[in-house]
Structure formats: structure tokens, C-alpha cells
Image (spheres, rainbow, N blue to C red):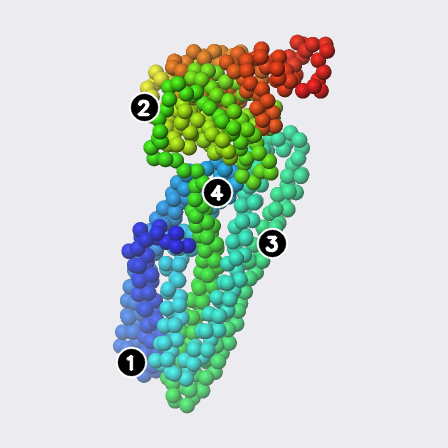
């Protein structure tokens, strides 16, 4: 929790002024019963109209000043809570950007979205109410008791007994409910994850007629969350009836004892009314306090979740400057006895991988589903760190390179095309903010996307919707490739990024990439033989191991796995004596 206090320190002045003005308002509220008692005893009963009007004017004046103090307090509380929540949300977003792919995989996007949105909003609400009421309500409660002692010590003993019991009940319920609110927020994460999965895959659900099963699964998760929230709600709901019972019992005792004192002449009627008003003030403030505690419980649980996310240290660090120097004679990419295991995985995804790629070479990476192709190329831009072994670029270990150097040298087009809302020009300039329109059109031409853009209204100024949903799959892939080409990387990685393209467009794309200026080392990851057949060397992956390496002709002679893939895609060339089970 202390880690979140620094965001509130920026609004230290507002955090002091908000409760201060609320306390000023509370002081005027505590004076009201005294003025009313004087109005009754010295004005109404004594028949002094001037006293009645004077007291009435004082009440109106105190109400006006109290209102002004309340509005001012609300302004400062809102400024502090909104500003703190904004700073916390920004800090969470910045922190998430620094986490490694492994940490993001473990946390899950649904949990991150819940913490950066719902949890922060709950913290903002709790902070706003806390600044306004956390001090005001106890101040009124204890202030009313003190004012009651100034009227009658004997009657005020009722306050002295009732108030500690009320606080014991209140804090007892709070201590029980706080952990449950944390569990409820975790349950919300699970429901959010299931909702996102179903909404993202709604077409698949319809295609397989799984609507009823999906609804049943959601109902099960949602019912669990509902039951947990009901349990927390029932416990929290005990607050009001218990406080009402105790307060009303105290009120009955107060009126009974005060009535006796009036009959004995020890108290005036107006003083009894004042004592009763103080008891009513305590009732109102405890109701507010009960609601505040429920809100603060939720806020504290959400604040802990936000703090726990900020407490996660990035497990992948980069040097500020490159360590060592590159070698012109070294391979562009070199793997030396590299093995890799995902966090929490039971078995390694890559085992003892060794190969090198020269500058300007085209490297094909092929293998079956789950063979480790994407894991292999993810180690080059250092999306993940190898568990053992070394990955080098131009003779330098990737761990010795700064983030800026890696980003500049390596360009990756991943399997899933992701485009952001905005114009095509804005999207392409992610590769290089200083790129001219000529550079953009050159990249589009290479990516076989120039015709797509030319047919759009506004061409480069055409507005892409969220995730590029106003484009087809093939169009998104080509624009994603063009965006990477704009940065003119030394190493270009296409991770099955042409799967939505037809064979003719795919072939034209590969020819255009081969003609790029400079010594661009290209990695083509694919399950199609046609995509990698003409590569300078082909890496054949199988179950995380490099089982073949060479040209197409060499692999057809030496690698059973490669031959099996080839004949499965070109069955017409399969020899009569070829046995399918020999792969």
C-alpha cells in the first residue's frame, strides 16, 4: 500500500484541504443542536421572539457557510482522487509495458485489463469518499459525545457506552469482509477472461453450435462470483441493522433518563432536544460510515491488487548502451546450443539448437504445428531469453544489446496481424516516424499492398478501425509487413505472416523481399514448402529439435521429416515405394 502513497503525495495540498473543509462543516453541524436548544429554552418557552429570530438567522448562516465548506471539500477531494487515479493508471500501464512476454503470459491480459480499469476506478471512488467522510464521521460521532457531556454528564454516559460498542461492531465486520472483497475481484478476473474468450470466438461457437455449452459454462462461473458477492453483501449488510439496533437502544435509554432529569428540574426541554439531535447525528454519521467502510474495503482490496502488479519486477533487463562491438565477419544470426522452456511448462520447447545465418541470406523455418518454429524466432528479437546457450547478432549476444539496438536491427511480423485505430499513414509510421510518403509507398509496393491502399478512400489517409476490422485478413497481413519494412531492419522475420495470402501474391512478396536493398537477412517461418523452398537454407523443426538443415535438395535426400512434409503437400510427386509411416 505504501507504494501507492507516492501518487497521492502529488496532491498533498488537496488531500489536506478536503478533510479540513469537511471538518469545518462538521463543526457547524455540531453547533446546530445548541442553537436549537437556546431557541426553545430562551425563545419559545420564554416567549422571546427576538431570540427565536436571532437563532433562526444563525442557523441559516451556518447552513450557508457549511454548504460552501462542503462544496469546497468536494472540489479538492475530486481533484485529489481523480489525479491520483490517473497517475496510478498511467504507472500501471507503463509498468506493464516493461514486463517481459513470459510475465505477460503468466498474468493474462484479462487480469491486467481488470486491474488497470475496474480496480483503479474503485480506488478512485474510495479515495474520494475517504477524503470527505473518513475524518468527518468519527469527528461528528466523538464531537456529539463531547457536546453531550457539556449539556449533561449523566446523560452523556449513554453516548460513552453506545459509541465503543458501535465501533467494535463496525470494525469487526470490516476485518471479515476485506479478504472476501479480494476474492470477489479475483473471481471477476475469471469471469472477464471467459467473457473475452467467448466474445472473441463467437463465430467459432456459432459454427460448432456450442451456444448452450458456452452459456452453461458462463452461468457456472458467474453463479460462483454471484454467490461470493452475495456472501460479502450479506456480511456487509449486517452493518446497518446492527448499528440501528444499538443506536435506537441508546436513544431509548437517553430519552428515558433525560425525561426523568426534566421532571426533576435538572435539564431544560431544549437540552433534551439537543441531546436527541446529537444522537440522531450519530445515527446518520454511522450510516455514512458503514457505507464508507464497505466502499473502502473494496478500494483497499483493489489497491492491493494494483500494488501487487507494480511490485512485479521485470525479469528481463537491457543495458543502456551496447556492450562490446559487432563483427563484420560474424554471422548475422547465430544460435549456439540454445534450449528454451516457457515458464511453468513441463518440458522444453527448444532443445540444443545450433545454426548460423549469414548476412543477406534467406532462412526458411518449417515444421509441424507445435514443433517450436515461433519459439525459435522469438529468441532473436529477445521476446524471450534462452534458458541455456547463446543467441548472437553480428557476434554480439542479444543480452548485451540495448532495446533500441534490437528494435532497430530486427523487424518482426508475427502470426496474428495487429493494426491500431487511425490512418494507414499513422500505422505505417510505427516503423519509422520520420519516413516520407515515398518510403511508405515503397514499403507498400514490396509488401504487395500498394494496390490495396490505392483503392481506399483517401489512400494513406484512409481510417483503420480498431484492430483493422474494416480490412480483410490478407490486407491486414500485407499492411503489417509494410509497417515492418518501413523501419528497414537488418534482420526481417516473417512468422507465418503470409498465411492469408494466395500463392501468387505470396510468391510475389517473397521475390520483392529478396530484392530489398542492403544485406537483409530474412527468416521465413511457414508450414508451406512453397514458401521456403527457394531459401538459402532451411531449418526443419520437430518437437523442439532441429532435425534438418540445408537447401531443399539436400533435405530431400537427408531429412525424413522434411520429405514427409513435402510429399504431404505434393502427393503427386510421391514415389510409389515411399512409406508414409517412415516420417
Residue 8 visible, this angle: yes
Residue lying at 32% horizontally and 23% vertically, measured from the top left: 434
Helix, strand or loop for disc 3:
helix
- Disc 4 to disc 1: CB gap under 8 Å: no
Query: Which label's residue is closer to the chain start, 4 or 1?
Result: 1
Nearer the observer: mark 4 or 1; the answer is 4
Which residue is the site of mark 1?
48
Can residue 109 be seen here? The reply is no
Q: Residues within 10 Å of mark 3 (few under 14, many from 20)?
A: few
* Mark pair 1, 2: CA separation: 84 Å
Which residue position holds label 2? 434
Q: Residue furthest bottom?
A: 264
Marks 3 and 4, how far apart in space?
Answer: 24 Å
- Whole-angstrom CA distance, mark 4 to mark 1, is 68 Å
**Which of the two labelled residues, at mark 3 and mark 2, occupies the earlier sequence position?**
3
- Determine the CA span between mark 2 and mark 4: 32 Å
Circle 3 or circle 2, nearest the eye: 2
Mark 2 and mark 3 in contact (Cβ < 8 Å)?
no
- Between residues 62 and 141, which one lies in front from this camera angle? 141
Q: Is residue 177 above or below residue 205?
A: below
Numbered disc in front, either 3 or 4: 4
| Neighbourhood count class around disc 2 (C-alpha, 10 Å): few under 14, some 14–19, many 20 upward | few
Residue 558 quadrant: top right
- Crowd rating for badge 4 (residues with CA inside 10 Å; few <14, some 14–19, many 20+): some
First of labels 3, 4 by sequence position = 4
Residue 448, position in %: x, y? 46, 15
Residue under label 4: 112
Residue beneath label 3, please?
227
Tell me the quarter of the picture where residue 206 sits.
top right
Amino acid at each position: 500500500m505504501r507504494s501507492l502513497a507516492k501518487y497521492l503525495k502529488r496532491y498533498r495540498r488537496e488531500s489536506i484541504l478536503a478533510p479540513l473543509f469537511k471538518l469545518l462543516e462538521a463543526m457547524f453541524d455540531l453547533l446546530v443542536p445548541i442553537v436549537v436548544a437556546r431557541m426553545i429554552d430562551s425563545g419559545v418557552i420564554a416567549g422571546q421572539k427576538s431570540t427565536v429570530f436571532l437563532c433562526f438567522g444563525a442557523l441559516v448562516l451556518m447552513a450557508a457557510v457549511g454548504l460552501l465548506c462542503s462544496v469546497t471539500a468536494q472540489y479538492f477531494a475530486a481533484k485529489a482522487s481523480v489525479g491520483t487515479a490517473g497517475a496510478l493508471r498511467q504507472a500501471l500501464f507503463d509498468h506493464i509495458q516493461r514486463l517481459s512476454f513470459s510475465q505477460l503470459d503468466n498474468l493474462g491480459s484479462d487480469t491486467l485489463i481488470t486491474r488497470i480499469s475496474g480496480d483503479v476506478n474503485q480506488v478512485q471512488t474510495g479515495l474520494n469518499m475517504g477524503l470527505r467522510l473518513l475524518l468527518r464521521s468519527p469527528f461528528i460521532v466523538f464531537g456529539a459525545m463531547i457536546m453531550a457531556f457539556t449539556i449533561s454528564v449523566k446523560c452523556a454516559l449513554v453516548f460513552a457506552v453506545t459509541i465503543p460498542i458501535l465501533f467494535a461492531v463496525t470494525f469487526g465486520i470490516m476485518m471479515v469482509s476485506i479478504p472476501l472483497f479480494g476474492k470477489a475481484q479475483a473471481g471477476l478476473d475469471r469471469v472477464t477472461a471467459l467473457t473475452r474468450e467467448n466474445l472473441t470466438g463467437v463465430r467459432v461457437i456459432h459454427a460448432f453450435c456450442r451456444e448452450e455449452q458456452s452459456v452453461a459454462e458462463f452461468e457456472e462461473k458467474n453463479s460462483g462470483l454471484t454467490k461470493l458477492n452475495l456472501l460479502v453483501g450479506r456480511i456487509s449488510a449486517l452493518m446497518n441493522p446492527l448499528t440501528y439496533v444499538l443506536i435506537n437502544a441508546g436513544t431509548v435509554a437517553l430519552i428515558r433518563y433525560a425525561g426523568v432529569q426534566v421532571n426533576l428540574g435538572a435539564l431544560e426541554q431544549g437540552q433534551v432536544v439537543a441531546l436527541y439531535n446529537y444522537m440522531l447525528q450519530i445515527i446518520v454519521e454511522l450510516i455514512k460510515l458503514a457505507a464508507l467502510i464497505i466502499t473502502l474495503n473494496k478500494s483497499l482490496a483493489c489497491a492491493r491488487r494494483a500494488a501487487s502488479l507494480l511490485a512485479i519486477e521485470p525479469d528481463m533487463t537491457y543495458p543502456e548502451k551496447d556492450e562490446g562491438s559487432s563483427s563484420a565477419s560474424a554471422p548475422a544470426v547465430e544460435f549456439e546450443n540454445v534450449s528454451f522452456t516457457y515458464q511453468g511448462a513441463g518440458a522444453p520447447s527448444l532443445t540444443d539448437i545450433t545454426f548460423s545465418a549469414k548476412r543477406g541470406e534467406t532462412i526458411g523455418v518449417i515444421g509441424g504445428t507445435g514443433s517450436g518454429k515461433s519459439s525459435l524466432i522469438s529468441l532473436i528479437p529477445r521476446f524471450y531469453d534462452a534458458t541455456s546457450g547463446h543467441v548472437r547478432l553480428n557476434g554480439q549476444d542479444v543480452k548485451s544489446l540495448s532495446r533500441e539496438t534490437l528494435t532497430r536491427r530486427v523487424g518482426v511480423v508475427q502470426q496474428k496481424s495487429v493494426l491500431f485505430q487511425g490512418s494507414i499513414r499513422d500505422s505505417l509510421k510505427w516503423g519509422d516516424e520520420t519516413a516520407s510518403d515515398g518510403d511508405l509507398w515503397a514499403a507498400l509496393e514490396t509488401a504487395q499492398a500498394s494496390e490495396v491502399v490505392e483503392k481506399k478512400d483517401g489512400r494513406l489517409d484512409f481510417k483503420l478501425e480498431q484492430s483493422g476490422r474494416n480490412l480483410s485478413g490478407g490486407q491486414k497481413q500485407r499492411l503489417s509487413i509494410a509497417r515492418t519494412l518501413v523501419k528497414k531492419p537488418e534482420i526481417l522475420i516473417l512468422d507465418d505472416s503470409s498465411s492469408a495470402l494466395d500463392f501468387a501474391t505470396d510468391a510475389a512478396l517473397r521475390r520483392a523481399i529478396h530484392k530489398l536493398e542492403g544485406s537483409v537477412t530474412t527468416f521465413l517461418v511457414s508450414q508451406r514448402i512453397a514458401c521456403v523452398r527457394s531459401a538459402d537454407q532451411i531449418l526443419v523443426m520437430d518437437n523442439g529439435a532441429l532435425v534438418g538443415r540445408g537447401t531443399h535438395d539436400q533435405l530431400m535426400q537427408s531429412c525424413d521429416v522434411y520429405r514427409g512434409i513435402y510429399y504431404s503437400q505434393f502427393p503427386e510427386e510421391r514415389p510409389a515405394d515411399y512409406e508414409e509411416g517412415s516420417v
